[in-house]
Amino acid sequence: MAEMWLYKLRPLSPFHFGEPSVRIGSTDGVFHSDSLFGALATGIRMWHGAEVLGEILSRFQERPPFRVASLFPYAGDVLFFPMPMLPLEREAEDAHGIRLKNVRFVSRGILEALLHRQSLDGHLSSDNLYQGGIVWSTREERALLPLPPHRREGVFWHRQVVSTLSIDRMVAASHVYRTGLVSFSPDCGLYFLVEIEDHSSKAMVENALDYLSQAGLGGRRSAGHGQFSIDSAAPFAPFWPTSGDLFITLSLYHPTLEELENGVLTGRAAYQLRRRDGWVSSPERAGQRRKSTCFIGEGSVLRSLAKASYGELVDVTPQSAVEMHPVYRYGYAFPIGVQAEGPSNEP
């Protein structure tokens, strides 16, 4: 039987999580599931060897031995999730004089209320919005947040842009470029959920995390960015409904042709697309560019097909004269249910 685990990562240095299609000076606040899986695959290869990694990837073609969500931020004891694309009570929102359209992350308490179709009236207050209005929590969870006394709005992570000098030794020319970084405040960091089918897969994930804690996550690792320690690893009990006609994904999701034909994006589905590309990090294919692919973004609402698993590994192997091994992007959904009945949040 599958088990769900929560891994909290405590940053030891800033991160660069840039969108592949955006300039290097920018950075994203989320480490997406396809990049996380790619990093874990690298860690499995470095720890167990290329043959074992090949066997793991083959298992994914039949039934995923584990599924990962994207890396999201936490602050103190409060976990933040992507804002789900569910309709909200706009009249109540207007009555309290706040706007939620800019919210990117919600606390567990807010997400639980949304998934179970509960009223949000008690939480519609500017005192419950942080990070310039992009983070929303319940009134009760406010006491669990590491809020600086002199910063009432709360700052859990910071963005900065640093300038770096590179030197081309071939022509003795210098070039200054800018890099976007994310740094976390004390008692804040990143976490992810993983659903694991067996103990051997759990050991591989944890071995890979041990390797990545020193090698780093994200970009600019050669400059020491992206290092972390594993703050905690604990079983996680799902708090979302187990049945319903809709689900929300906590990972990037690439539907299969069969899922599209069966209507996973129809009905009350609400989703956003993310284009993903970038460079291959494999030793055999370093410096080659992966094929560009579109994914359904985190927080999207999809129509339930009553399946055990949604999505697939996407073949993004570069087109080149020398074919060393296939290259994949992780496209499995991390589904959480939405209650089918109850008070409607529609205006």
Image: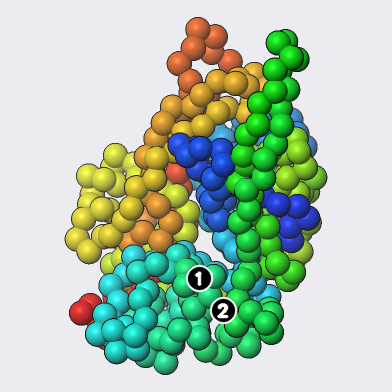
Query: Does residue 170 sit above or below 174 in this rendering?
Result: above
Residue sitting nearer the eye, 176 or 82: 176
Check contact, mark 1 vs mark 2: CB within 8 A: yes
**Which numbered circle lies on residue 153?**
2
Q: Mark 1 vs mark 2: which is more N-terminal?
A: 1
Residue 257 falls in which quadrant of the image?
top left
Tell me which residue sits at (26%, 80%) in the image.
90
Tell me which residue sits at (70%, 36%) in the image.
164
Q: Identify the element where label 1 is drawn.
A: helix
Tell me which residue sits at (55%, 20%) in the image.
288
In the image, what residue type sits under mark 1? Gly
Q: Which residue is mark 1?
A: 132
Whether residue 36 is visible to the viewer of this picture, yes or no, is no
In the image, what residue type sits under mark 2? Glu
Q: Position of residue 221 (x, y in %)?
A: 72, 39
Tell me which residue sits at (56%, 79%) in the image.
153
Of the 4 image quadrants, the one containing the N terminus is bottom right
Q: Is residue 342 left or right of residue 336?
A: left
**Which numbered circle lies on residue 72?**
none
Q: Identify the element where label 2 is drawn.
A: loop
Q: Position of residue 248 (x, y in %)?
A: 39, 63
